[in-house]
Image (cartoon, helix red, strand yellow):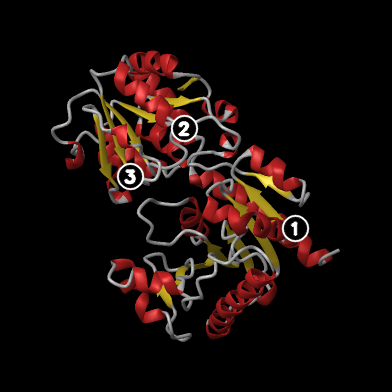
Amino acid sequence: MSLKGQNIIIFSQMQFDNHLESTNYIMAKHLAQDNYVYYVDRPYTWRDYIQFRKTPGFRARKPYFFSSKNSFIQTEIPNLKIIITPPVPSINILPEGILYRLALKINELIVAKRLNKVIEHLNISNFIYINSYNFSYPTLHKLLNPVLTVYHCVDPIIEYYQTKHGLISEDILVKNVDLVICTSKELRNQKALLNKNAFFIPNAANISHSQKALDPILPVADILSGIKKPIIGYFGNIERRIDYDLVKKLLETNRDKSFVFIGPVDYYYIKEDSAHPNLYLKGPVPYGEMPAVLKGFDVAIIPFKKDEVSSHIFPLKLFEYLGSGRPVVSTDFNPDLKDFTSDTVFYCKNAKEFSEALEAALKDTPLLQQKRLAIAADNTWEHRIMEIKELLKINLDKKLKYGDN
């Protein structure tokens, strides 16, 4: 029997109104179909409060920052509420050590005080607590008294601002929860060294959304207008995962193609010589416009670099691409992906193989498209959430029966 009718508090690293739909929020929305879900938005720091005070995101949260009785946003899904917490001190600047850990306890107390008041106000009892990649608050659950504690690990910790304290914090978190769910095999293997109750459940896609790209009536997104065909497209964050050396070689050897990157750009990783006549960095678009964007791609790509952590990555966009029917070319950054995509995706070792794969992908056929759609249909969020709910149910029943023993 699957999980149903439970109270679930998800404390997330990702904000509910993020530019791109996140694994964390997608999971919350699906769990809320037959459970009562309270999605705790990543707490603003005092620095965020000042820096973002003129943004739409700040204005959406402002009425809820300082009122425990008026601290949640009702979403369009009846069973899903967004909880906003008060701003907390900005502590990441502190060096790792006793002072940082003391400051962290204060932040956890501030957040816990708000959550406990909401729990009391909404009469929430016997709830499951899921820390969804918010490793910065490793012991918050100990102040909330949930019946089951879960860490949802969606990515390796890479960036300096994360590793500075996050590596230590995540280890503390993993050791102290009842269950760990990881989105890649490598992450699962790593976390299982600290918590034997660790499981692998990969990312998936909102196929019903990405399949809108197949609608003959849907117009191609305006953001692609005027760009010469064929369009080789990427949809997602443009950040450290991208193999920029590979992209540069692709641009130089495929001058007849337009390479379009749609998504937020982290210019820390974009080199000064990145300008190229057939490269288009178009910035982010709302998630709702994704199908219209993907419809304009002739080939969708995942040009991630292969490094010491790439095997930890199981990208959401892979199945979104497949669900849109687009041909997909990727680097071979994570060998586990082949187990889920059969022979429908080109996985390439270098720029030469990537260029050859692009040429092959441009000779697409309806039969190949149907094979991709079939693979996507087997990797939907409906499938993944069912796996997550079954895992939560098994562990909840075990916890209620045996306690912490």
Q: Seen from this angle, which residue lies furthest right?
A: 405
Say left or right for 28 vs 352.
Answer: right
Q: Amino acid at mark 3?
A: Gly
Tally of numbered discs:
3
Locate residue 274, reporting x and y percent.
Answer: 31, 33
- Is the residue 63 above or below the residue 154 in the image? below
**157 or 217: nearer the viewer:** 157
- Label 2's element? loop
Specify which label sits upstream in the sequence, 1 or 3: 1
Residue position marked by numbered label 1 in the rendering: 175
Q: Is residue 187 above or below residue 9?
A: above
- Where, quadrant-wise, is the N terminus in this rendering? bottom right
Q: Is residue 386 above or below residue 366?
A: below
Amino acid beneath label 1: Lys
Q: Amino acid at mark 2?
A: Phe
The reply to whether residue 214 is visible in this rendering is: no
**In this rendering, is residue 55 above or below 284?**
below
Residue 119 image offset from top left, x and y in percent: 57, 80
Q: Position of residue 33 (x, y in %)?
A: 49, 60
Marks 1 and 2, how far apart at CA: 31 Å
Give the residue at mark 2: 304
Place residue 44 in its image quadrant.
Answer: bottom left
> What residue is pinned by disc 3?
263
Q: Earlier in the sequence, mark 1 or mark 2?
A: 1
Disc 1 crowd, CA 10 A, few/some/many (<14, 14-19, 20+): some
Q: Nearer the viewer, residue 350 or 401?
A: 350
Residue 241: % across, % down: 47, 38
Q: Which disc number belongs to residue 345?
A: none
The C terminus lies in quadrant: bottom right
